[in-house]
Image (cartoon, helix red, strand yellow):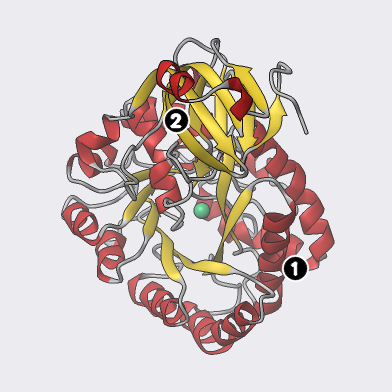
Amino acid sequence: MILINHIRQIVCISDSYQSFKIGTDMSNLHIIEDGAIIIQGERIYELGSSNDILSHYSPDNFTEIYDASDMCLIPGLVDAHTHVVFSGDRVHEFAMKLEGKSYMEIQAAGGGITFTTSHVRESSEEELYNLLIPRLDRMLAFGTTLAEAKSGYGLELDSEVKMLKVIKKANEEHTIDLVATYLPGHAVNPGKTAQEMVDDIVNHQIPVIKQLKDNGEINPEMIDVFCEKNVYEIEETKAILEAGKRIGLEANFHGEEIEYLESGVLAASVKARAMSHLENLSEQAIPLMAEAGVIGVLLPTTQYLLHLKTPPARSMIANGVPVAIGTDFNPNMWCLSMPLAMHMACVNYRLSMAEALVASTLNAAASMGRSQEYGSIEPRKYADLVFIKAERWEHLIYQMADPPIAAVWKKGKIVIDKYDRFRLK
Ligand SMILES: [Zn+2]
C-alpha cells in the first residue's frame, strides 16, 4: 500500500457514493484539511485526516510514503465531450471566423465538418491513432484522466467504424480512459437529405454497429446526433437516438446550440443520459430535464469562439439539472484543457469554482455512466488523482492558462510528476 499524507486539502467531491450532484449540493466539496490517502493497487483504500490515518497504521504497513504538505488533491478531471479523433486541422477557418464568417456559412462553403470528414475518410486507422496519442498526452498533463470520445467524422459506416476502432485501441493502450460515443448524425453528407441519412443510419449502420460491438471489435456506449435546424431536426434526431437505444446505446447528444429547436424537451422524453451545448435551452425544458435526470453538458469554449448565446447555467443548477463541463475539443475549437473550460464556465456562466469542479469530475463521469468508479475521492474508486501545487485547490481554475498541476496519478500509478515528488515506476 502507498500512503500520501499531510495533503493540504483533499477535495473529495462526495463522501456517500453519490451518482451526481445537483443544486446547492454542487457547492459541497467534502474537503479534508491536512489529509492522508492510502492507495492499494489501482484503487483508493482509505482516506481521512493525517492524524486519524497515522494513528491507525504504522509505517511498516506501506511500501511507499510521501509527504504532500505543499499540495492539494482533487479527483482526476473528466472531460464530458470531445471529438478528439480526427485528421486535418482547420486553422484556416479560424481566420475566416475572425473575419466574421459564421459556423454554418463555413460549413456551407465546404468547410467545417465536411472538410474534416474528407480528411478522416482518407486517413488510415494508424494515422488517426498516431494523431490522437499526443492529444491524449496533452489532456493528461491538464489533469484529465477520463474522457468521452466521439466518432462523427466518417458519416458513412466504414469510416465511423474506423474511428470507433481507434478509440477502442487508445482506451486500451493510453493512460487516459475513454468512453466511446457513436455519432452517426454529426452532419448531412452533401447531396443527401437528412431523411436519407437517417434511413442509412437506422437500417444499415446501426445493425452492423451492434454486430461489431457484440464481437468486441468496437465498444461504443452512447449514441449522438447534432440536433440543429437544417441538420437533424427533432423527429430525425429522435429516430436515430431511439434506434441506438434499441441496441443498448445511451442517448448523449448535441442540442440547442445555434438555434432553438426544443431539444431539451426531446432529451427528457427519450430519457437521454446527457445533452450538450444548451445555449438556447428553454426555461420550460429545464424542469423536464431535471426530472428525467438528463445531465446538461456545458461547452464554454465553443460558445465563446462562435459568439453563441450564454446557456442558462444558473437556472439549470437552481432547478436541479445535473451540470457537467467538457472541452468540446475538435478541429473547430482546439482546447484540450479542462481547467481553461472550467475558468470560462465560472466567468461567463457564473458558476462558482466548487460547482465547476463538481461539473468537471463527478457529474462529467455521470454523463458517461462512470460515476461509480470515477469522479470523486472515495474508498474503492479508482485512484485517479491530480495534485495541485498551491495552498488551495482553487488555483487550478484561477491560474487559467497554466494551472499548477504538479502530479497526476492514474489507477494508482504516478504518470506525471513535474517536481519529482513521487517515484515514477
Ligand atoms: Zn461536439
Q: Is residue 366 above or below residue 225?
A: above
Residue matched to label 1: 121
Quarter where residue 35 is shown: top left
Mark closer to the chain start, 1 or 2 = 2
Q: Amino acid at mark 2?
A: Leu
Instruction: Give residue 367's position: percent from left, percent from top.
Output: 41, 54
Residue 292 is left or right of residue 56, and the answer is left
Relative depth, front residue between 67 and 285: 67
Residue for point 43% across, 46% down: 364
Element under label 1? helix
Residue for point 38% across, 70% down: 233
Relative depth, front residue between 314 and 16: 16
Furthest residue in direction bottom, as rendered: 203
The quadrant of the image that shows the C terminus is top right
Instruction: Give residue 188's position: percent from left, percent from top.
Output: 54, 71
Residue matched to label 2: 47
Q: CA distance from mark 1 to mark 2?
A: 48 Å
Element under label 2? strand
Relative depth, front residue between 162 and 86: 162
Q: Is residue 325 above or below residue 210?
A: above
**Ligand 1: does it lie within 8 Å of the C-beta at label 1?**
no
The quadrant of the image that shows the N terminus is top right
